[in-house]
Image: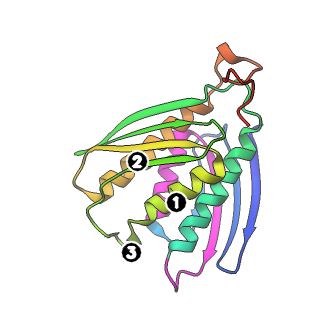
Amino acid sequence: MRQATLSRQTAETQIQLALNLDGQGRCKIQTGMGFLDHMLTLLCFHARMDLDLTCRGDLEVDAHHSAEDIGIALGQALAQAAGDKRGIARYGQWLLPMDEALVLAALDLSGRACLGYALDIPAQKVGAFDTELVKEFFLAFTRWGGITLHLRQLAGENSHHIIEAAFKGVGRALRQALAQDPAFQGQAASSKGTLV
């Protein structure tokens, strides 16, 4: 079973997380940030990962520490659950439409962290959520997950739609990349012989 549980405790956040990569897309997420809860639920639903996540953060300061630390914890859990990555497809890409928004998410579970971020989100906030934290979340997620991720916005005017397309697209791309590929049964999808 490709699963991971972890706890992250700092002076700014307390996070408990359980992740199952081979789930049904079921989520129990409580971060104190309703919009981020919604986006993480969409990501996991489309990736078909089960996620149980609670975060108690210093939201009286702002949401930055919580969004970043959730990205760290989710990246760590994904890397742990994926293990040596033998037999997986490794790459995933999805071009996702969300009404007028169109976002490409392309990723490589290479073990090398890199974020190419080209989302142009017009609003500073969606509800109470600072939209600049979308990038902070994905930066932390890719760094600690060892993921190369490119997000490219091809169209979009509505901030909610752009962000939702990105999270759904990443979920779909993760589902592809984590899927077992018969061509690489028992081995890493790399000429080097490892993805760790």
Q: Residue at x 56, y 65 (%)?
A: 68
**Cα separation between marks 1 and 3:** 16 Å
**Badge 1 element:** helix
**Cα separation between marks 3 and 2:** 19 Å
Left or right: where 88 falls relative to 31: right
For label 2, the crowd category at 10 Å Cα-Cα, with few meaning under 14, some 14 to 19 and many 20 or more, is many
- Disc 2: which residue: 166
Q: Position of residue 93 (x, y in %)?
A: 46, 32
Depth check, mark 1 against mark 3: the one in front is 1
For label 3, the crowd category at 10 Å Cα-Cα, with few meaning under 14, some 14 to 19 and many 20 or more, is few
The magenta region covers: 35-62
Left or right: where 55 falls relative to 167: right
Q: Is residue 42 magenta?
A: yes
**Badge 3 element:** loop
Residue 1, picture quadrant: top right
Q: Earlier in the sequence, mark 3 or mark 2?
A: 3
Of the pair 140 and 159, the residue shown nearer to us: 140
- Disc 1: which residue: 137
**Badge 2 element:** helix
* Numbered circle sitting on residue 128: 3
